[in-house]
Image: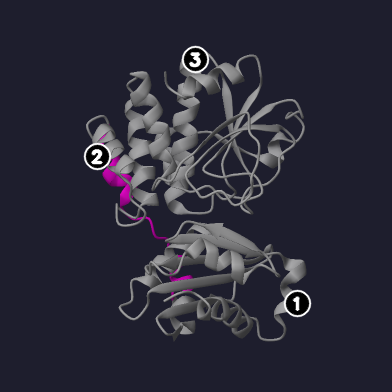
Amino acid sequence: MSRFLQLADLCRGHAVYIQTHNFPDPDAIASAFGLQGLLAHCGIPSTLCYEGRIDKLSASKMLDAFHIQMIPYEALRGTMRPEDYIICVDAQKLSGNITDFIGDEVACIDHHPVFAPIEYRYRDIRQTGACATIIAGYYRDLGLTPSLDTATALLHGLKMDTLQFTRGVTEADIKMFQYLFRLCDQEKLARLERNNMEFADLKAYGAAISSIEIYDATGFSYVPFSCPDALIAILADFILSLEEVDVAIVFSLREDGMKFSVRSELPSVHAGRLIREALRDTGSGGGHAAMAGGMIPPERLPRLGRYPQAAVRELFLKVLEGAPQ
């Protein structure tokens, strides 16, 4: 029996919200959308929700292409109740990138490592390249054929989060690619993957390039103005593509603090552990071996002193100096 049926039994008779991480990316959106379809098949209505903004072109294109409705938390404050059920998708409580909503987080479906042990009534946390892989597996195991839009969205989320199958790919991701490929709309998928950069993004690229510093194959880039989560992650991938860089650390100064994205191609440097240790006394972070993210809240930024760029560099280099070679 599919594990999903346990979740469906849990949710019956309750108001259900599917919450992604803040500033949802294509994998989070696709996973939430796919899960909503599965619940609907079982006669369980649900609402997709998030905190923050849909702040990247690739994410907003998905919402338009598949007519997905995601409600910002601000619009739910008068309707969500403490007894309502929340399913966390592509994120976990206390992970630093998901806001604690008023409802009851009874379930979690995610592909990130567990850094804070939380008791859920339903838990499906597996190491895969994308959360969309887990949701697609539910459809396959149930013998259900996802709609054309659902299959296309899940495949797009899978491709985006694995960087076109070059990052964190598992055997399960490959199997779900094969499963979804024959069910999706190839033309719509191609349109989603084209033209995902906005003119305003060039300013962030320029800042990242002009500020890059490389220390023993670790590249640091500082964007001294507000930059969306998704773009910071893209910049980290961009810096990592340099021949001289094996570990990339990109950080942006924003109103809500300092946002980080870390990438690693070295088996000896686990990106999630690196950022967690580096920000231990100033912020929080975590993630996979190859990719991770973190944040220093605004009230702790003064701890970086007058030269935050240099202070951040020293925090990470101190941890890297102690990493096994």
Residue 275 x %, y %: 56, 67
The answer to whether residue 141 is visible is: yes
Residue 38 x %, y %: 46, 23
Q: Which label sits on residue 302?
A: 1
Residue 175 x %, y %: 27, 37
Quickly name the residue at label 3: 42
In this view, 62 is above or below 298:
above
Question: How packed is label 1: few (under 14 Cα within 10 Å), some, or many (20 or more)?
Answer: few
Q: What residue type is labelled 3?
A: Cys
* Comes first in the chain, label 1 or label 3: 3
Q: Which residue is drawn at 48% across and 54% down?
A: 56
Question: How packed is label 2: few (under 14 Cα within 10 Å), some, or many (20 or more)?
Answer: few
Picture quarter with the C terminus:
bottom left
Question: How packed is label 3: few (under 14 Cα within 10 Å), some, or many (20 or more)?
Answer: few
Residue 277 x %, y %: 60, 68
Q: Tell me: 39 left or right of 225.
A: left
Q: Tell me: 197 left or right of 322.
A: left
Q: Does 49 appear in magenta? A: no
How much space separates mark 2 and mark 1, taking CA atoms?
50 Å
Closest to the camera, between mark 2 and mark 1, is 1
Q: Give the range drawn in magenta.
A: 184-205
Q: What residue type is labelled 1?
A: Pro
* Comes first in the chain, label 3 or label 2: 3
Q: Tell me: 117 left or right of 273.
A: right
How much space separates mark 3 and mark 2, taking CA atoms?
30 Å
* Comes first in the chain, label 2 or label 1: 2
Q: Which amino acid does label 2 sit on?
A: Glu
In this view, 98 is above or below 264:
above
Q: Which label sits on residue 17?
A: none
In this view, 62 is above or below 142:
below
Q: Is mark 2 on a helix, strand or loop?
A: helix
Q: Which residue is drawn at 46% across and 82% down?
A: 212
